[in-house]
Amino acid sequence: MPAPLPVFRIIGAAFQFVWDKRARMLRALAVLMVILLVVEHGVTLANDNPLKFVQAFIKMALYCLFAITCHRLVLLGDPGVPDYGLRTWTLRESRYMGWSLVILVVWLLFSFVINSWIVSAFIRDVEAGGRAEAFHSIQPYFYFSYIPVLYIFSRLSVLYPAIALGQAVNAQWAWRITEDNGWRLTVVVCLLPSVLFYLAGLLLRDNATFVENIILELIKFSLLAVEVVALSFSYKHLTETQS
């Protein structure tokens, strides 16, 4: 059984790693970040445009490359990534993105069920004479139903760093290696990014200058790197302490 995950030590180590390796990470991720900025902000498509799905697919592929680069820098060191980033798409990247798509589809289906449940409960409440305002006050509690699926996704998240290393792993392996550490991983995989991106959102302001927007984007990419690095350290701890 792997030893208990030292959550706060891992989070601290992730921040330290990104700071200490900032020049190396920037060099390896610069091209990806520029392309992501162009795809996200330089191309505006209507929601009903079929190319919107193509754009979303490209963004997911780029973020997969971003995450794989971070995982490999943590787990393999500088030799694990070319100086100016990954240049080819291999089976490794396809498997990484495949799992991302599986989890995304499950998440969308689960969200559809929960939202349908909320709408049905709202309609029944109003038809029974309830006030819409009273329903809205309790609506946030419905979202606690997401906790179990977040827990499951967190336990499966160790697949990502393993796949980034080219390992042949599956969901059964992930479930076994994360036994007794599921909630700790949920803090790292779900709570940490939520807090980080909430704090980043506080930096937003109307009429921001071009320079401010660029700085904010760099901060967002840095926080994303911290999240991925924290998962890498979690994977490393679980695999190294497994008995």
Image: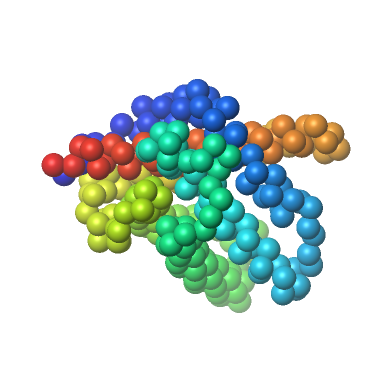
Q: Would residue 145 be visible to someone looking at this image?
A: no
Q: Quadrant of the N terminus?
A: top left
Say how the picture is coloured.
Answer: rainbow
Q: Which residue is at a point 50% across and 35% down the rendered structure image? A: 226
Question: On screen, 102 above or below 189?
Answer: below
Question: On screen, 153 above or below 241?
Answer: below
Q: Position of residue 66 (x, y in %)?
A: 54, 47
Q: Residue furthest left?
A: 243
Q: How many numbered discs, if any?
A: 0
Q: Position of residue 139 (x, y in %)?
A: 55, 58
Q: Quarter-wise, where is residue 208 in the image? A: top right
Q: Would residue 82 be visible to someone looking at this image?
A: yes
Q: Position of residue 112 (x, y in %)?
A: 53, 70
Q: Which residue is at a point 66% across and 68% down the rendered structure image? A: 54
Q: Which residue is at a point 63% across and 57% down the rendered structure image? A: 59
Residue 1 placement, left or right of 171:
left
Q: Position of residue 31 (x, y in %)?
A: 65, 44
- The residue lying toward the viewer, choosing from 132 and 65, is 65
Q: Quadrant of the C terminus?
A: top left
Residue 1 placement, left or right of 43:
left
- The residue lying toward the viewer, choosing from 118 and 51, is 51
Q: Quarter-wise, where is residue 99 in the image? A: bottom left
Q: Which residue is at a point 41% across and 50% down the rendered structure image? A: 164
- The residue lying toward the viewer, choosing from 197 and 225, is 225
